Image (cartoon, rainbow, N blue to C red):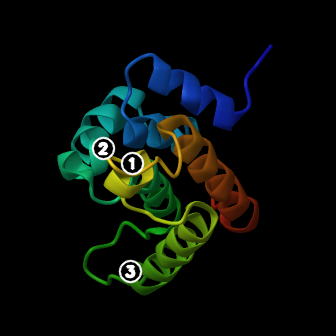
Amino acid sequence: MELNRESRAVELHKKGYNCAQAVACNYCDLFGLDEETVYRMMEGFGFGCGMKEICGAISGAIAVIGMNNSSGNPERGVTKGSTYELTSALGKKFEEKNGSMLCGELRGGPDKAPLRSCGGCIEDACVLVEEYLKEHYHGV
């Protein structure tokens, strides 16, 4: 039985991928990218960029939006503004659902209960990516 993308991303996380890698690598096939390259590229975005800042799952989702929306033309930069709008909207939806986009707040701490597990954040990011792709997927 084939897993849906949310479940597959959670499984990748259980295998040792960080949250950013689990989300971004989960969509490599849609963009003709090899998973090893995306895995390597996203490594520094896990654990909130190693500082418990922006959630890695959101960073992975933002990478997917960039892979889909960017024109790939640095001379014109024609898609930057629309990509920023799309990623901002995604971040706001994630924050509305979970109360934060910050890894340190989501994971909780010694005197604060977690807002959401890493697996839950990965699932939420994938749901938001799926919603985005239904409306905006360009293909390769």
Q: Earlier in the sequence, mark 3 or mark 2?
A: 3
Q: From this viewpoint, is residue 22 visible?
A: yes
Q: Which residue is mark 1?
A: 108
Residue drawn at 33 percent across, 33 percent down: 39
- Residue 90 screen position, x and y as percent: 56, 69
- Residue 99 screen position, x and y as percent: 53, 66
From what the image shows, is residue 109 above or below residue 67? above
From what the image shows, is residue 1 above or below residue 95? above
Kind of residue indicated by mark 1: Gly
Kind of residue indicated by mark 3: Lys
Query: 10 Å neighbourhood of mark 3: few (<14), some, or many (≥20)?
Result: some
Left or right of 115 in this view: 110? left
- Which numbered marker is on residue 110? 2
Do the residues bearing badges 1 and 3 touch, measured as CB atoms within 8 Å?
no
Left or right of 122 in this view: 38? left
- Residue 40 screen position, x and y as percent: 25, 34
Q: Earlier in the sequence, mark 1 or mark 3?
A: 3
Do the residues bearing badges 1 and 2 touch, measured as CB atoms within 8 Å?
no
Residue drawn at 43 percent across, 79 percent down: 84
Kind of residue indicated by mark 2: Pro
Q: CA distance from mark 1 to mark 2?
A: 7 Å
Query: 10 Å neighbourhood of mark 2: few (<14), some, or many (≥20)?
Result: few
Q: Which residue is mark 3?
A: 80
Left or right of 46 in this view: 23? right
Left or right of 104 in this view: 67? right
Q: Nearer the viewer, mark 1 or mark 3?
A: 1
- Which numbered marker is on residue 35? none
Residue in front for this viewpoint, 56 or 51: 51
